[in-house]
Amino acid sequence: MLILKDTIEEIKSKIDIVELISRYVSLQKVGNSYRGLCPFHTETTPSFYVNPSFKTYHCFGCGASGDVIKFVQEIEGIPFMEALKKLAEEAGVKIEYSSSNSFQQLYFNFYKELHKEYIEKLFDEKIALDYLFSRGFNEEEIKEYEFGFSPINSKIPQKIAQKLDIKSLKKFGFSNHDQFEGRLIIPIKNEYSNVIAFGGRLLGEGQPKYLNSYETDFFKKSKTLFLLDIAKDKIKTADFAIICEGYFDAIAFHRADFKNAVATLGTAFTKFHAFSIKKLTQNVILAFDTDSAGVKAALQSIKILISMQFNVMVAGKTKEKDPDEIYKTQGSSGLYSFLKEAIPAEEFIPYVLSKNYDLNNSNAIPLYTREIKNWEKTFENFPEKLQTFRKTAEKISKTSITVSVPKPKQKTNLPTLDEMVIYLLLNNPQVDIEINPKIFNELTQEFIKSLKNLKNFSFEKLSKDLQKYIENILNKMEKFEINEDYINTVKKKIEEKTLEKRIEEIDKYLNSATEEEKRVLLQTRMELVRKLKKLGR
């Protein structure tokens, strides 16, 4: 599918990059740019910048860089065309293209046809139905959750591929055999309800018990939440999301009419998962398994969620191992009580950490206190949560935890002309200002040269040294606003530096000049000095 370049540029011009990225990242205005914690790698000091002038983002930490289309692609784990289509709808730009040859459409058709076949096989297999009945599902629920089955020696993916004239199944997450044979099939959908992958639960002996589809362009475990397509509207209405660890835990909540539950797919909770939730709510209840692995997963998830300004509760006070087991033994009321007894993350952490120590032993208290202090960093930007966290830990350990006082920030030096010019050009690249590159250092010259073609400017193309140089300037000058006074100051300093440079050059040639040349050079030098004085030097 070919899209006109002008159409792409129109879409980009109509989308406010700052507003769009703010839906996923908490941005702070620094000067004329915006800064936040990078969504593409873990960091505690913000190095992710959004530049409204260039309509680009760039992380000086991991190098992630691009425009609005690239951002939506990366943050939502979707192909270019899907991101473009999504932004076109938002911008009100119509894209005309034929989807008949679209790989995306072929992918969705393949999984749709394959899913139909798996559903048909389920009702032919007593072992699969008996398994679901044993878990308390009735026939109506089996149809509602669209379970399927892949029989032993299944060639169903190959059959569908032949039907759709697909030559190779590699890009579809399959090889020359059906990896799901002998397994109950659980459909995994994207947020638009398209089947993009499957989960398989082994019926019988063997390992692994659960298996997910191989990752593809349309399916990434780190970016996919099970049942989000159904849960997204309910999460908005309830204004909180329940996050579980497995298919049947999320399904248990849905069966109990808590349809705002989603689950990760055999992988740790990630920032990408959090972004999917943040569009809907900032309130989360973690409903992970209550064993040691579940507690560890909850602690890792809390770090991510708190850093992204979520309000986090943790459900975990129960004898049962997981929500699915609670539903089996206690039904909907059991899950209601499970959620009702959830406690804030800032209370949960001191409580679970204390289980690692015998606090009746005075030697254990300093170890516990040290671990608590390490966790304080998680809440340092949230005073109320930090206070609760400390009080809870103090109550548990029956000892006082010293409050650490942050060191005052040292005053920064005044910016140089090079720094002022780069900062100006970063925030206002089309400013009407005459620049003589010769008066600047090599890195500034390199940056000026890169701006010759503004439409093709990209932070990715800059050298590592220049990227680091720019990052330091942005950090140093975050309080400066680009206004008329700033621009006039820069113009004046450029004029001064240009005059100084010419005087320098004259002084260099004076020693080797002839008498006549010296006379002319000295006259010129005097004129330049007079101009400098007029500028206030």
Image (cartoon, rainbow, N blue to C red):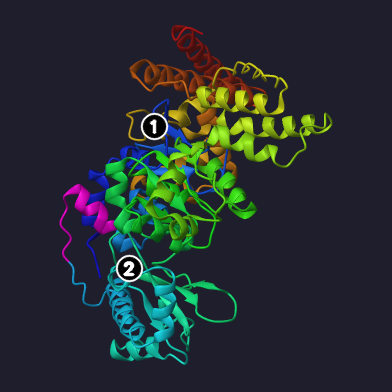
- The residue located at (47%, 58%) in the rendering is 329
Whether residues under marks 1 and 2 lie with C-beta atoms below 8 angstroms apart, the answer is: no
Residue shown at 44% from the left, 47% from the top: 274
**Span shown in magenta:** 84-96
Which disc is residue 145 wearing?
2
Horizontal side of 298 relative to 13 (left or right) equals: right
User: Between residues 226 and 497, which one lies in front from this camera angle?
Assistant: 226
Q: Is residue 214 magenta?
A: no
Q: Nearer the viewer, residue 402 or 238?
A: 238
Kind of residue at disc 1? Asn
Frontmost residue, 487 versus 75? 75
- Quick one: label 2, few (<14), some, or many (20+) residues within 10 Å? some
Q: Is residue 397 visible?
A: yes
Q: Is residue 337 left or right of residue 363?
A: left
Residue denoted by label 1: 427
- In the rendered structure, which amino acid carries the disc numbered 2? Tyr
Q: Is 94 one of the magenta-colored residues? A: yes
Q: Position of residue 77 (x, y in %)?
A: 40, 59
Q: Residue furthest right?
A: 363
Q: Quadrant of the N terminus?
A: bottom left
User: Is disc 2 placed on a helix, strand or loop?
Assistant: loop
| Mark 1 surroundings within 10 Å by alpha-carbon count, few (fewer than 14), some (14 through 19), many (20 or more) | some
Q: Position of residue 222 (x, y in %)?
A: 48, 58
